Image (spheres, grey):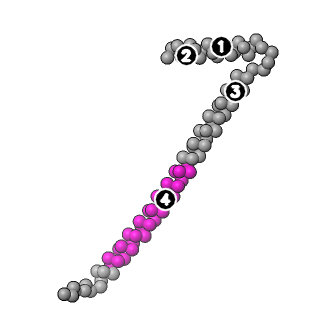
């Protein structure tokens, strides 16, 4: 882990020295900005995908609750009708 950090620091120092000494414009910072923008866009796409999934699940849950309430009302109504109606005797 320590070697990894030292290696990264060495690379960054080399890039900084190369950018500072040369006459060409430094490409490290624009590349870092581009990478950060790509990461941000990927995170935004993931968030939007999860939001749409959440909204779909929420809508499905609301529809299921509405259907359950309607079925419970229908059950209570049928129980009331069956309780009021005379029972039929079985024919042999």
The image quadrant of residue 90 is bottom left
Asked if disc 3 and disc 1 are in contact, CB closer than 8 Å, the reply is: no
Q: x and y percent of residue 69 in the render?
A: 42, 67
The residue wearing badge 3 is 31
The image quadrant of residue 34 is top right
Cα distance between the residues tagged 1 and 4: 55 Å
Instruction: Pick whichever, 62 or 12, lies toward us.
Output: 12
The image shows a total of numbered marks equal to 4
Looking at the image, is mark 1 or mark 4 nearer the viewer?
Answer: 1
**Residue extent of the magenta highlight:** 51-80
Q: x and y percent of residue 84 in the render?
A: 30, 83
Cα distance between the residues tagged 3 and 2: 20 Å
User: Considering only order in the chain, which callout, 4 or 2, is on the residue closer to the N terminus?
Assistant: 2
Q: Secondary structure at mark 2?
A: helix
Cα distance between the residues tagged 4 and 3: 44 Å
Q: Is residue 59 highlighted in magenta?
A: yes
Cα distance between the residues tagged 2 and 1: 12 Å
Asked if residue 3 is positioned above or below residue 52 in the image, the reply reads above
Q: Secondary structure at mark 1?
A: helix
Q: Is residue 42 left or right of residue 77?
A: right
Q: What secondary structure is the stretch in magenta mostly built from?
A: helix
């Amino acid at each position: 882990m320590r070697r990894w950090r030292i290696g990264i620091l060495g690379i960054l120092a080399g890039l900084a020295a190369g950018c500072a000494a040369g006459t060409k414009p430094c490409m490290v910072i624009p590349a870092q900005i581009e990478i950060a923008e790509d990461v941000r866009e990927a995170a935004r796409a993931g968030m939007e995908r999860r939001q749409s999934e959440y909204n779909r699940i929420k809508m499905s849950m609301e529809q299921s609750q509405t259907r359950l309430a309607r079925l419970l009302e229908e059950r209570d109504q049928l129980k009331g009708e069956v309780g009021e109606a005379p029972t039929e005797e079985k024919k042999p």
